[in-house]
Structures are given as C-alpha cells and as structure tokens.
Image (spheres, helix red, strand yellow):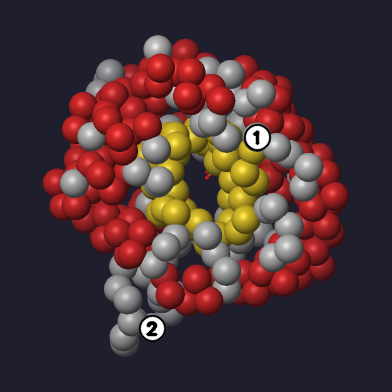
Amino acid sequence: MAQQASQKNAKKIVVANWKMHGNLKQNEVMLTDFIATLSGLKHTQVVVCAPYPYLAQLQILLQHTPIAWGAQNVAKNEEGPFTGEVSAAMLRDFGCAYVIIGHSERSTAYCESDENIAQKFMVAKKHGLTPILCVGETLIEREAGVMEMVVGKQLDTIINMYGAEVFADSVISYEPIWAIGTGLAATPAQAQAMHKFIRGKISSLNAGAADRLKILYGGSVNPQNAVQLFVVPNIDGGLIGKCSLNAQAFEEICLAADESAQ
Ligand code: 13P
C-alpha cells in the first residue's frame, strides 16, 4: 500500500521519441510550442529525445526551461576507434540528461544483444545520464503467453552483470513490439500486469531500487488512451513515438500525465 501511495504522488515522466524525424526549422517550431504549453507542469518531467545532430539545438532552446532532453542511443564504449558511434560523455557535453537504450527498432535492425544493451545502460549511468531501458515482447511471444519470461530475461542480463541496485533512479519503458507504431496500444490491464511484474521482480531483489525506478509505457500512446493508461498503478508515464511529432497531441498526453499525478 505504501508503495502505491508513493507512486501515485510521484512525478510522471513523458518522453518524446522523435526517432529519425525532424529538421532544424520543424524542431524549432515544435520546441517553441512545447515550451509555451508545458513549462508550467508541476507533476510531470517532459523529455525530448532527438537524433544526434539536433542535440545542440535542443541544448540551446531548452537549457533554461523545465524540459529535459536526451538521445536515442549511446555507444557501449567510452572512447576510441569506433567510427560512427557517439559516447556518453559526448551526450553530456550537449546537456543530455536521458538516453534511450535498447529500443526494439535498434535491437532488431542492428542486432543489438542483451549484453550490449546492458553495457550501454551502465555506461550511461556512469556518466550521469538516466537510461530509459526499453523492454517488451513480440506478438508471437504474447500469444504464446511467455511475455513475462521474455521481459524477465531482458532484465536478468542487466541484473546478472551489474546487480538490481542499478535500477535505482533509472527508467524502464515497457514497449510491447506489437504495439509500436501499429495504433494498437496495450490495454490498461495488459500494461498494469506487466508493470507490476517488472516492479515486483526488481523489488524482490532490491526494494529500495524498485521504489526509485520509473516504469513508462510505450506503444501507440495517444491523447485518448493516455488518460486511461496514466491512472494505472505502476505506470509512471509514457514513451511517445508518432504522437510526439504532433505538438498538440504530445501536449495533450503530457497534460493527461500531469493531471493523473495530482
Ligand atoms: P509509437 O508511439 O509511434 O507507437 O512509438 C512508440 C515508441 O516506439 C516509443 O519509443
């Protein structure tokens, strides 16, 4: 009971994952709108995760606002001959506070292993970035009823390599792969069950870390379903793809989060 009460009063987090979208002009229009509409939110941390080339623009436009920013990936190595990679220290140079790790669009297209993802998680933490770790199952895995086993295994790699305490002050985003970009979000009951499983698993190993962990939901969140999803216990906010590219839709989602946290 105590945990549910503290979760309800805790700040929500809503993250825009712009994926490979945007340009200097569009971004400026969008960010100016976000600043005007979202700067007054009291119970929600808004975060924008943009492609690497635009991090300097985010830093310039957002640095004196309550809106935080971050990247969508980071190198597992700290420095060296890794052409095309971007290190955690470089992200810090551009004021990033967050970084998305292990998004399924990357792990599928670029064959990222759970071990690679775990190393990225730790390098982010080492450099003071808050990792947003994406976990989730495919439709086939859900239909086979093994979704908790799949998500549990994704978490186990990090737990076995670094211990459950690394989840304190971290973010996990439950993103069922079948819900990403399909318009078919998980139901509040489906999301609630998985979020409860995730927090319970971390809590059984380190209750303090579980209390300080935020668990977001991602996958076809829109202004309508956000209202139902954000009131569910253990859903601490959302990771938003398509609707983060539309200022009005994203702002409505952030306002729904803020309302649910009051
Ligand atoms: P959509 O909101 O477009 O389904 O994308 C979700 C996502 O992948 C967020 O990281």
Q: Residue at x 28, y 48 (%)?
A: 166
Position in image of residue 137 (x %, y %): 35, 33
Amino acid found under the numbered disc labelled 1: His
Position in image of residue 125 (x %, y %): 36, 59
Q: In the displayed orientation, state which residue is furthest to the left.
A: 160
* Camera-side residue of 103 and 215: 215
* Camera-side residue of 50 and 144: 50
Q: Residue at x 73, y 63 (%)?
A: 64
Position in image of residue 94 (x %, y %): 57, 73
**217 with respect to 243 (left or right):** left
Query: Gap in Å between the C-alphas at discs 1 and 2?
Result: 40 Å
List the residue tagged with mark 1. Answer: 43
- Work out which quarter of the rendered image holds the N terminus and state it: top left
List the residue tagged with mark 2. Answer: 83
**178 with respect to 162 (left or right):** right
* Camera-side residue of 189 and 1: 1
- Work out which quarter of the rendered image holds the C terminus and state it: top right
The 10 Å Cα crowd at callout 2, few under 14, some 14 to 19, many 20 or more, is few
First reached walking from the N terminus: tag 1 or tag 2: 1
Residue 20 in the image: above or below residue 224: below
Q: Is residue 182 visible to the viewer in this orientation of the structure? A: no
